[in-house]
Amino acid sequence: MTEHLVLAAVDGSQNALVAAGVAARFAKLLSGRLGLVTVLQVPRGPLGFGSGLFSGGLRERLMEEARAEAEGTLQGVAERIHAACGLQMPEYFIATGVPEVEIPKIVASDPQIIMVVVGRQGFGTESKPRGLPHALGDLGAKLSMSLRVPVLTVPADALEGQICAGIAQIAPITDDKEG
């Protein structure tokens, strides 16, 4: 029997953590697994500066840093969900491009994915992340137009009973060490 996979889009925002908690609850209710996905968006050229700024490997270095940051974020979310929700360790996917293009590619390549869960608002409505931009703001609407699996859009103030038990007590993911 094929094990179902519920895929949650994560961009490091608190809204995405809530959505991942809802996705974890669905995965547990369906006796399935949880997958986490993030998409790194790389600007084609620096905003307002001309293309010369990305010469000399700067783009590659920025991508390496963004990928390392994304892996750390996904690993942190996966560990928190594993500990709080009693699920096996979630697997994760990192793609580069535009979320509404890359997530459908991931879904199409894995027939075990039965649902995609996104936060209603990502970093587009929260403070901007450091490094390369991630955006999940209106992603749910865009995905619902292109995917053949259900897309669940989760509000940031989802009720505690809709989130996997224990997730609501998890503090937001932050890298801020300053007071």
Image (cartoon, rainbow, N blue to C red):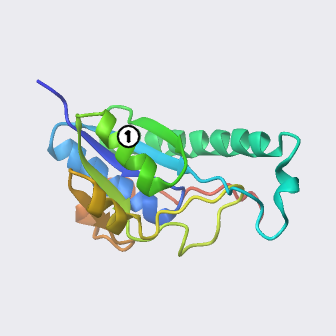
Question: Quarter of the image holding residue 86?
Answer: top left
Q: Nearer the viewer, residue 8 or 21?
A: 8
| Residue at the image position 28 percent from the left and 63 percent from the top | 145
Q: Is residue 171 visible?
A: yes
Residue at x 33%, y 68% (from the top left corner)? 141
Relative to residue 28, is residue 81 drawn left or right? right
Mark 1 Cα-neighbour bin, 10 Å: few <14, some 14–19, many ≥20: some
Quick one: which residue is furthest to the front in this view?
Answer: 51
- In terms of image quadrants, where is residue 120? bottom left
Residue visible at 43% across and 52% down in the picture: 101
The residue identified by callout 1 is 106
Q: Residue at x 46, y 69 (%)?
A: 137
How many numbered marks are there? Answer: 1
**Residue placed furthest toward the top:** 1
Q: Position of residue 116 (x, y in %)?
A: 29, 52
Three-letter residue code for mark 1:
Ile
Quadrant (top left, top right, bottom left, bottom right) of the N terminus: top left
In the image, residue 161 lies at what x, y percent?
Answer: 23, 63
**Residue 108 image position (x, y, % from top left):** 30, 39
